[in-house]
Image: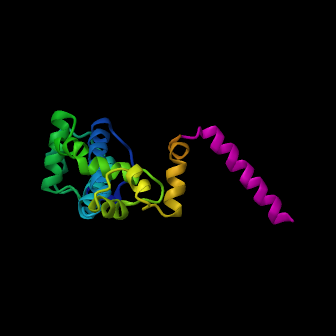
Amino acid sequence: HAGKWLCGSGGSRSLAANADVANELEKLAGIYAAHGRQKWRHYAYSKAAKAIRSFEVELSSAEQLEGVQGCGEKVRAKVAEVLTSGTLRRREMLEQSETVVALASLTSIYGVGPSVASEWLAKGVRSIEEAFEAGLLNDTQLTGFRHRVDLAERIPRAEVAAISAAVVAALHALLRA
């Protein structure tokens, strides 16, 4: 039963082909999550990606996943496609669709999730700038919009560690007082 049940796996040891397949499935799951109305597909592809990352044998064919929890017939077809071509046509097609591009743009702002983005799309709003101009942003979203460049910038790990150490030291000092 090794590798059959996700909960019985010993960790997330990632083999090269398995990681490639899992990455493609996670990207597809992310697209479905952003779409909002596709939560079950998001869940299914996320679960399959996790199972594949935990699979203890390097994948060379989708048939190896037969009987693995979370890897049904449709998932195995996607796995076969990734193993053959290195990518998923469905993901590439969805990433280029106008709706997914608009959803990604809108949800990139702090405070805007899939539900709000879908509502705005239904009103014809295709970008965060259009939402701003239409006065649709609440205070949290407005803060996210104003600071979007700063929020998108990655902070070096060393800087995060220094900030963390300062906060911990301040809390210890406060608790001793």
Q: Is residue 109 above or below residue 23?
A: below
* Position of residue 63 in the picture relative to residue 116 (left or right): left
* Position of residue 154 in the picture relative to residue 76 (left or right): right
Name the one closer to the observer, 32 or 175. 32
Secondary structure mostly seen in the magenta stretch: helix
Quadrant location, the N terminus: bottom left
At horizontal 58% and vertical 40% (from top left) the residue drawn is 155
Picture coordinates of residue 69 (x, y %)?
Answer: 23, 59
Quadrant location, the C terminus: bottom right
Instruction: Examine the image and state in which quarter residue 35 appears.
Output: bottom left
Say whether residue 166 is magenta.
Answer: yes
Q: Is residue 107 above or below residue 139?
A: above
Name the one closer to the observer, 133 or 39. 133
Q: How many marks?
A: 0
Say whether residue 146 is magenta.
Answer: no
* Position of residue 164 in the picture relative to residue 117 (left or right): right
Picture coordinates of residue 118 (x, y %)?
Answer: 30, 61
What span is colored magenta in the figure? 154-177
* Position of residue 118 in the picture relative to residue 110 (left or right): left
Residue 42 appears in the figure: yes
Picture coordinates of residue 90 (x, y %)?
Answer: 17, 45
Picture coordinates of residue 63 (x, y %)?
Answer: 14, 47
Name the one closer to the observer, 141 or 26. 141
Residue 11 appears in the figure: no
**How was this image coloured?**
rainbow
